[in-house]
Image (tube, rainbow, N blue to C red):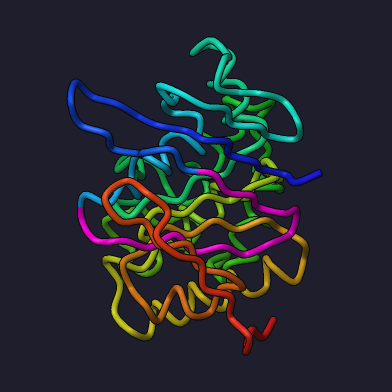
Amino acid sequence: MSLLEIKNISKIYGELKALDDVSLKVEKGEWVAIMGPSGSGKSTMMNIIGCMDKPSLGQVLLDGVDISKESNKNLTNIRRDKIGLIFQQFHLVNYLTAVENVMVSQYYHSMPDEKEAMEALARVGLAERAKHLPSQLSGGEQQRVCIARALINYPEIVLADEPTGNLDEANENIVIDIFRQLHREGTTLIVVTHDPEVAEVAQRTLVLEHGRLAKEIVNENFKD
């Protein structure tokens, strides 16, 4: 059974179909990239996979459970327990330190644990920056705090939205190396990106066009 299975979903706003009869599967431990031009449905797809929205039609199965019919409250709980979100804009709390920003995610899941939060920061190479505020961190460091925050509750899926969109090449490579390590550890990765270089390091790329799944590209040269 696939970890994530999307069956014939559509998202309709009036006469606009942001997604139009899309079906796909993601296996446990797989690394998938989702690409497409502006308006192709990438953000809508991310919101549905990330339990931040529901399709107008179709089914979304996570671990065999149809989450497309769940209440908003239940979707919040599923997102908290099963999905780690990484955002392009970071969404860090500006008056909290790096380690406190990671602990915020724990607060909504169980109990804050500074030792665990420090271990999560160490995984992304930021243990020595734990007591710094976001304003004292570079863009690349802020993104790594976001990754640590996404990992702290051991999610089944890490869902990243343009995770390198605001980064220079050096920090982009650092983030990709972190993703490689996560994949080696068995984490399921779904990365929404417009950057072909980021997509090319994934096992498989799904290309959306006009709300439909236009093609699938398998990376024959994939290296863990």
Whether residue 97 appears in magenta in the rendering, the answer is no
Q: In the rendered view, does 162 fall on the left or right side of 8?
A: left
Compare residues 90 and 35 and report the one nearer the observer: 35
What are the residue bounds of the magenta stretch? 23-38
Q: Which residue is drawn at 28% across and 37% down?
A: 18
Horizontal arrangement in the rendering, residue 52 relative to residue 158 (left or right)? left
Q: In this view, does 191 lie above or below 70?
A: below
Q: In which quarter of the image is the N terminus?
A: top right
Residue at the (69%, 67%) spot, across then down:
183
Against 174, is 185 above or below? above
| Residue 27, image quadrant | bottom right
Question: Is residue 31 depicted above or below 8 in this figure?
Answer: below
Q: What is the x, y in percent for residue 131?
A: 47, 55
Residue shown at 63% from the left, 85% from the top: 220
Residue 121: percent from left, percent from top: 59, 59
Q: Residue 76 or 66: which is nearer the viewer?
A: 66
